[in-house]
Amino acid sequence: MRRLIPAAALLALALAACSDDPGDVEEPVDTAANEESPSAEAQEPVELDLAEAEGACPFIDSAVLDATTGEEFRFASGGPGEDAEGEDAPAQLTCAVQTGEAAYPDLTLFVIGTEASAEVYEEEVNDKAETVDDLGEAAYWIVHTEDTGAGPALEMGWYDGGTIFEMRYTTPEGTEPAAVEELVGGFTELAGGINQAYADSLE
């Protein structure tokens, strides 16, 4: 069975895709829930406007995030990924956002450059994931209910123009999975804004 592309495995996909053979892509392991986010090199969490934070944080529309979740997110920490140094390394940016009231809910965002194609990306998506229309060249969402460290987690990932995005919203323990699924529409809007903001930053 094909697996989701966990955050830490996105870099492996980005680097391995330099081969013409999609079969050379390294097999992903575990889910993004088991990965540290953001990296140890990220700045200390600060209370501020996301637009002023580092890493991938400025791409997140805090008003849409708050309206979608019904929460007030106030703390953000972002920076380059752990392996982003070096001329040949693909671009990597991370961001983690919290309310400050508790560890969860939280939102993490990973942005990683790749030479892989949209077709290679789609081949690595879990068969149980749902597709997302009108988001990049290929996109999916799935709700994790196990091994999240808290409550159910909504994972939404997409590929666009040589960049892989992975966004994950983890809820507090005790949240019903159905309630998380109801957030897909709002997070699709948030993802579209992130995608556009990132594209604008490259101009």
Image (cartoon, grey):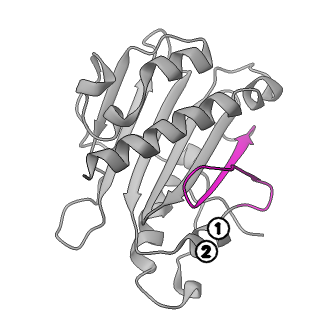
Q: Residue at x 40, y 68 (%)?
A: 114
Q: Amino acid at mark 1?
A: Glu
Label 2: few (<14), some (14–19) or many (≥20) C-alpha neighbours in 10 Å: few
Q: Position of residue 12 (x, y in %)?
A: 44, 70
Lateral position of residue 114 relative to residue 92, left or right:
right
| For residue 65, above or below residue 166 | above
Foreground residue among 9 and 73: 73
Foreground residue among 203 and 176: 203
Identify the mark at residue 149; answer none if there is no mark: none
User: What whole-number distance in Å separates the C-alpha atoms at marks 1 and 2?
Assistant: 5 Å
Q: Is residue 152 visible?
A: yes
Q: What residue is disc 1 on?
A: 122
Q: Residue at x 63, y 43 (%)?
A: 155
The range drawn in magenta is 126-145
Q: Position of residue 36 (x, y in %)?
A: 44, 43
In magenta segment, residue 133:
yes
Q: Are marks 1 and 2 in contact (CB under 8 Å)?
A: yes
Label 1's element?
helix
Identify the mark at residue 119; answer none if there is no mark: 2
